Image (spheres, rainbow, N blue to C red):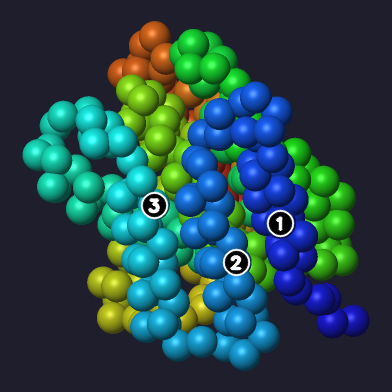
Amino acid sequence: MPTPRGGGLVVVSVVLVVCGVQPFLGDAPHAGWSTIAIAALLMGFSWLDDVRGLPVSARLVAHFAAAIAGIALLPAHSLVFQGWLPIWMDRAVAVIAWVWFINLFNFMDGIDGISSTETASIGIGIAFVSLFGNLGPDTEANALAGAALGFLIWNWHPAKIFLGEVGSVPLGFLLGGLLLGEAARGQWAAALILPGYYLADATITLCKRAIAGEKVWQAHKRHFYQIALRGGASHATVVLWIAGANLILIALAILSVDDPIPALIGAAVVVAALLAHFTRMGRAPAR
């Protein structure tokens, strides 16, 4: 039976509504209405992509426009890379990083439940880091985590509905903005640790495909989680392994509030171990 896509239309809408009512509840929004408006426009654009299919160039233009607009909303004194780069380079690299995160999040959304689980994990992780870092509650992170967990009921294997571009692209935008925001507020280690598996899998796979001369923007089955599937693992098994690793990454992100270097080393070990485990699973005889 064909599985419908476009479930992200509801997931992202819920997040945007929650963030939009924050000011009326006496809670200053993390992102603000401007970022909410950008995410809503990106959601509409991605819905068109789901329905009609848009060229890669048009998608990239939209993603860059969204990231540039989002970075422009940062306070003038806010430095994503903590003063390691001049202000113009800080902003330029942040835009590129944001666009890359939007696209890698979209690339990785290839099996049942994976991006719902990743969204919930990053949202929960940012909420805890904000709490332990004395940065105050983060309603946007909580909204993302809650909406993703609610959607996971329908998206768990075998999925009844998929996120689609309308979900994965704006979710990548919102999560990327939260992670850059955490970095700008001094929690740069946590911003690297929480999406560690997605960053590593997507980046390593892209580099391998580019070296092989492949068209990196085209669909493929070379991600590490897809290698595990080829070895006979189920969608649910692979996602549970990712969820387990993410729980450890959340704990390490909390640790990074006070001890960033040991936490980063621990996160690198966890992610490398998961990638190696998926590779071994791929060598197992298919069941």
Question: Mark 3: which amino acid?
Answer: Gly
Q: Are marks 1 and 2 in contact (CB under 8 Å)?
A: yes
Nearest the eye: 141 or 107: 141
Q: Which residue occupies 44% across, 38% down? A: 179
Q: CA distance from mark 3 to mark 2?
A: 15 Å
Q: Residues within 10 Å of mark 3 (few under 14, many from 20)?
A: many
Q: CA distance from mark 1 to mark 2?
A: 9 Å
Q: Which of the pair 65/162 is nearer the observer?
A: 65
Q: Nearer the viewer, residue 18 or 272?
A: 18
| Residues under numbered marks 1 and 3 in contact, where contact means CB atoms less than 8 Å apart | no
- Percent x, y of residue 75: 31, 36
Residue highlighted by disc 1? 13
Give me the residue at 80% from left, 58% from top.
Answer: 155
* Residue ranking furthest to the right: 1
- x and y percent of residue 100 in the render? 37, 59
Which amino acid is tagged 1?
Ser
Residue at the spot of label 2: 43
Marks 3 and 2: CB-CB under 8 Å? no
Residue 190 in picture, x, y percent from top left: 43, 27
Which numbered dot is residue 70?
Answer: 3
